[in-house]
Amino acid sequence: MKEKRLINRRKAIAAGLTTIGGLLLSSCYKKPLPPTYGNILRMGDVFTYLAQRTLLPGQHPVRQYQQSDITSFPATGNTNPADPAIKTSYNKDYAQLKSNDFKDWSLGIEGLVAKPGKYTMDDLKKLGERTQITRHQCEEGWSAIAQWTGVPLAALLQNAGILPNARFVSIYGYDNYAESIDLLDALHPQTILAHTMNGNSLPLQHGAPLRLRVETQIGYKSVKYVQRIAVTDKFIDAAGDGAAGWSWYTGI
Ligand SMILES: Nc1nc2c(c(=O)[nH]1)N[C@H]1C(S)=C(S)[C@@H](COP(=O)(O)O)O[C@H]1N2
Ligand SMILES: [Mo]
């Protein structure tokens, strides 16, 4: 298992190497400015991004915990995309998927990948699995510890074949919530698409059937109810309705 994980990780890192190399050697190595540079409301990004991307190796792991550290876990933000109070064009689609226990659900991947397309849950599970017990830190101040099992995002990106000019990954949820991350976070070994929480399939309020876990960043980057993923070369401020006003980069 450990062996397999290492191999997957090596493969994933190889896949991203050209891109990360380009990222570091071009704009980021000499001048690691976040893509939100120039937006006065997001000035905080400049300092955190610059400090972390310059001082820390991009793939440093965050702390992992023991089973006995697991806590109760509040559900915040949207807790059911089928609720018409959440204004999206996907209310009905999500309700439909949910009524069939998400058997018809699939994840779309598009943009700068060699093989755009859809992955069913079974397809995703074949790509690999990683389990980790981590602390979720919400921007509102609370934190909670849970065990997450899922597919490394790097394994999916590797399978879809990210193209050399890729720089960002945007993740869109069924509730119109979206976030984007750079490739260092996307290929980080602890960045996973989780289908299982504390050993059970992901509960509705925590993002069923699949949520992102970006352990290197504050909780709002961990998009629930994932619908599709887009790989881009240009920065798209994906955090439309969902996270408007929060920093784009908020490394822990
Ligand atoms: N799709 C979606 N993802 C989301 C949110 C949301 O409202 N919708 N809220 C974010 C915030 S602010 C936090 S703290 C966590 C909350 O996850 P939880 O409900 O499992 O505690 O999800 C993040 N991801
Ligand atoms: Mo949050």
Image: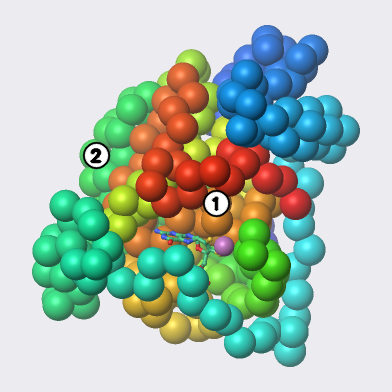
Q: CA distance from mark 1 to mark 2?
A: 23 Å
Query: Residue reaching furthest right?
Result: 55
Residue at x 76%, y 15% (from the top left corner): 31
Amino acid type at mark 1: Lys
- Other residues around mark 2 within 10 Å, as few (<14) / some (14–19) / many (≥20): some
> Mark 2 near ligand 1 (CB under 8 Å)?
no
Report the side of 244 relative to 120 (left or right). Answer: right
Corner quadrant of residue 160 = top left
Corner quadrant of residue 79 = bottom left
The residue singled out by tag 1 in the image is 221
Image spot of residue 173 (x, y percent): 34, 53
- Other residues around mark 1 within 10 Å, as few (<14) / some (14–19) / many (≥20): many
In front of the other: label 1 or label 2? 1
Residue at x 60%, y 76% (from the top left corner): 147
Instruction: Give the vertical position of 178 relative to 184 (above or below).
Output: below
Q: Earlier in the sequence, mark 1 or mark 2?
A: 2
Image spot of residue 219 (x, y percent): 60, 59
Instruction: Give the vertical position of 154 relative to 97 (above or below).
Output: above
Residues tagged 1 and 2 counted as in contact (Cβ below 8 A)? no
Residue at x 72%, y 36% (from the top left corner): 44
Amino acid type at mark 2: Gly
Quadrant of image for the N terminus = bottom right
Q: Is residue 208 visible?
A: yes
Scheme of image coloration: rainbow
> Mark 1 near ligand 1 (CB under 8 Å)?
yes
Instruction: Give the vertical position of 170 relative to 27 (above or below).
Output: below
Report the side of 187 relative to 206 (left or right). Answer: right
Labelled disc at residue 117:
2
Local SS, label 2? strand
